[in-house]
Image: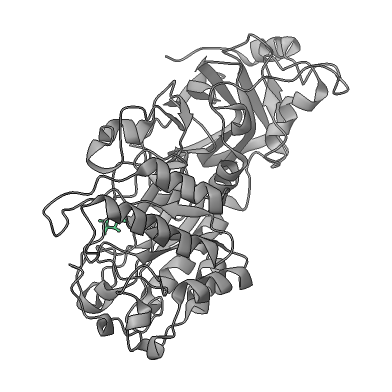
Amino acid sequence: MIRKYTLTMLVLTGLLFSCGGPSGGGTEPGPEPYGPVPTDGQLRWQQMERNLFLHFGPNTFSGKEWGDGKEPEDLFAPTDLDCRQWARTAAAAGFKGLILTAKHHDGFCLWPNPESRHTVAQSAWRDGQGDILKELSDACREYGLSFGVYISPWDRNDPHYGSDAYNDVYVRTLQSALSSYGPVYELWFDGANGEGPNGKRQVYDWPRFHETVRALQPEAVMFSDIGPGCRWCGNERGSNGRTSWSSLSPDGFSPGAGAPPTDTLQQGNVHGTDWIPSEVDVSIRPGWFWKESENDRVKSLEELLEIYYRSVGRNALLLLNVPPDTRGHIHETDSARLMDFSRALDRIFEKDIAAGASVKATSSWKGSEYAVENVLDGDYDRYWAAMEGDLTPWVTLELPEKRTFNRILLQEYIPLGQRIASFTVDALDEDGYWKRIAEETTIGYKRILCIPPVKTQSIRINIERAYAPPILSRIALFYDDVSSYLDK
Ligand code: FUL
């Protein structure tokens, strides 16, 4: 629907607009949180935006994706392991954290786990003295990165797998990995669950696993299909739902085969009981592990940018897998691509086209600290809130002159919950008509709309449906001249 307004009407309507209301001097009650909200750890996690995943282990040397657990320990033989190179590359390319497959389904542990006879300690590599969790956690500290671990519950090597005794082994394995290497920001629980030597599938003791992690690493965000810290986005193609609620109702579901349908993982649950935001895990190569034959199949810059828009730009965290090679290096093709990706993001998002705009809202929460000008200051902790009871406000931006943009970035202030269910964007055209340029659903922590270029001086964001007065931390406009991706 196209709404028609003349410029004069716009000016008159502007007189009714609030610019933040009278100063409340901080004495007025602020907006109450709505629905589930993130913990401090989940908020910090979300603000990391993009992290690297490192699949490394015996499969790196066998060329398999899933080892069967019978691989000799000596198969694992990196010729020049350099965890500092992984961390240096990640930091230089703007990633904030790293997650290593400390144990994949083959059961081989990249640290000397006393619970297992299938680890680096049993290999000839560095005379059995190597410890990759130690080296990587040290390198992360050196480069200011957060450190995370993937510890596969499915274990194709452990003889206890398929019986209750395995749950004890797995708990002690978690204790070993989580107590010696400093803070762990994320623990990745893979949902894969095969049969043990007795032909039985393991019945995992999830409550106990979670308790173990909470006791040792209270800040760690736990990933699985259904959280409890963050959820799988439902595919490995690098794409979150265009609608994405960070809330989910996990009751009655379990990780793996008992997970909710893919649509639910993609979109979350609109009135979900728990804050379990989406994480998009995807590999820069066709496989999760490095293979010589895939050196020329590293995703292009265009593909990586599309993944960025479909993950970070759709209220999810991006976990991009960049698997080290048999030397123990991130391959030069992959690291060069990561740098291209990072430079492209810097270029696209360095200049906010909305800078210098005057901004007005149809209503604001009482108190100057909720003024609509806050959406332009780039400070996530300062936000605009609509007036109490107002679920359908709109915000207009008047740019200093006509400007061209093709990306619109919006952020809700999630410590007060995710509130907006649908919104539209209009731009004033040459003839003074508001022309609809976007019609979308959720926003969440970050939503980036990818639209064809628009040249205008006036933009209007209409909140069409919200469950509590909308709260926006940021509105920004950008021009992407690197990728041609459009929302679809
Ligand atoms: C899957 C695993 O089976 C793959 O090997 C890989 O680790 C991926 C991230 O998760 O469930």
Whether residue 210 sits left or right of residue 431 in the image: it is: left
Q: Where's ligand 1: which quadrant?
A: bottom left
Residue at the extreme left of the image, as rendered: 199
Q: Position of residue 488 (x, y in %)?
A: 33, 36
Q: Nearer the viewer, residue 216 or 394?
A: 216
Whether residue 165 sits left or right of residue 484 in the image: it is: left
Q: Count of labels shown? A: 0
Q: Nearer the viewer, residue 33 or 15?
A: 33
Q: Residue at x 27, y 50 (%)?
A: 164
Q: Nearer the viewer, residue 55 or 287?
A: 55
Task: Look at the image and tell me in which quarter the N terminus lies.
Answer: top left
Q: Nearer the viewer, residue 482 or 219?
A: 219
Q: Residue at x 59, y 38 (%)?
A: 39
Q: Position of residue 191 (x, y in %)?
A: 29, 48
Tell me, yes or no, if residue 85 can be seen here: yes
Tell me, yes or no, if residue 231 can be seen here: no
Whether residue 450 sits left or right of residue 142 in the image: it is: left
Residue at the extreme front of the image, as rendered: 165
Question: In the picture, residue 431 is in which quadrant?
Answer: top right
Q: Position of residue 446 (x, y in %)?
A: 53, 38
Above or below, comparing residue 419 to residue 185 in the picture: above
Q: Residue at x 71, y 17 (%)?
A: 364
Above or below, comparing residue 478 to residue 33 in the picture: below
Above or below, comparing residue 96 to residue 306 in the picture: below
Q: Position of residue 467 (x, y in %)?
A: 53, 15
Question: In the picture, residue 414 is in which quadrant?
Answer: top right
